[in-house]
Image (tube, grey):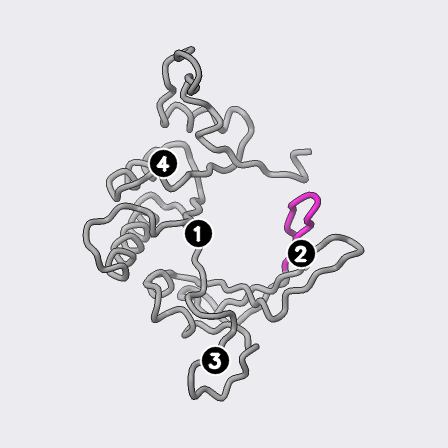
Amino acid sequence: MSDQYRFSFGPWNISSGADPFGPPSRKEVAMAEKFKLYRELGFEGIQLHDDDAVTLADLEKAYADLAAQDVSMVVVDYAHLIDVPGSDLYEKSRKVAMKIKGLSKRYRVVTVAASQLTRRRGAARPGDDAPKDRSPQLEDIAEGSPWERTASQVLLIDHTKTRYIPATRTRVMTLVCPKNRHSERGWKLEIAWDLDTMIMTEQ
């Protein structure tokens, strides 16, 4: 099975040792101790909820703890929920993006930051000659998010080419790379997502 599946571990899978309906059964396990256990149990990745690192200081500590356990990749989702002082959403996002990029370099950990298009899928701008069903471009998101400006590489899902194959219950998605600071850009990659096994494979 280890040749086919790779599993990730959520720190919340090791409970706090208490539940809402009774007294604690044991002391809570520290986050760093949970990280030590995941490799021993055969997991290859760690999932973090947005409330596992709620400030930039907590985020830095989480990276340090993960790096100490030889974690090679961190996936960040809902980064806009990280608590940063101020009311300007763009500036707050910029600070988080720069912080995560700095932590990635310092601890030599690859970081994948999930983001969404801020405009309608494939929508052309007013006055644009491009069709409304065109593939997403870097300019569709660069103005609205500092993540794309900070990232070394950007991958977009081309929803105009996504298709479903009923016979195999497979969804095929096309990834495009409009930005790559360290290598060539413009390449495309088809990924097949098996909806029964949840395994993704390159086409």
- Going by the numbered disc 1, the residue's amino acid type is Val
Mark 2 neighbour class, 10 Å CA radius: few under 14, some 14 to 19, many 20 or more: many
| Residue segment shown in magenta | 191-200
Find residue 141 and report its horizontal and vertical position in percent: 40, 69
Judged from this view, the residue extending furthest toward the left is: 86
Secondary structure of residue under mark 4: helix
For disc 3, the marked residue is: 124
Q: Report the quarter where the N terminus lies.
A: top right
Distance from disc 4 to disc 1, alpha carbons, whole Å, reads: 17 Å
Residue at left offset 67%, top offset 56%: 192
Q: Nearer the viewer, mark 4 or mark 1?
A: 4
Q: Earlier in the sequence, mark 4 or mark 3?
A: 4
- Going by the numbered disc 2, the residue's amino acid type is Ala
Q: Earlier in the sequence, mark 2 or mark 3?
A: 3
For disc 2, the marked residue is: 192
Distance from disc 2 to disc 1, alpha carbons, whole Å, reads: 20 Å
Q: Quadrant of residue 152?
A: bottom left
Q: Nearer the viewer, mark 4 or mark 3?
A: 3
Distance from disc 4 to disc 3, alpha carbons, whole Å, reads: 38 Å
Q: Is residue 33 left or right of residue 178?
A: left
Distance from disc 4 to disc 2, alpha carbons, whole Å, reads: 31 Å
Distance from disc 3 to disc 1, alpha carbons, whole Å, reads: 27 Å
Q: Nearer the viewer, residue 31 or 186?
A: 31
Secondary structure of residue under mark 3: loop
Q: Nearer the viewer, residue 56 or 109?
A: 56
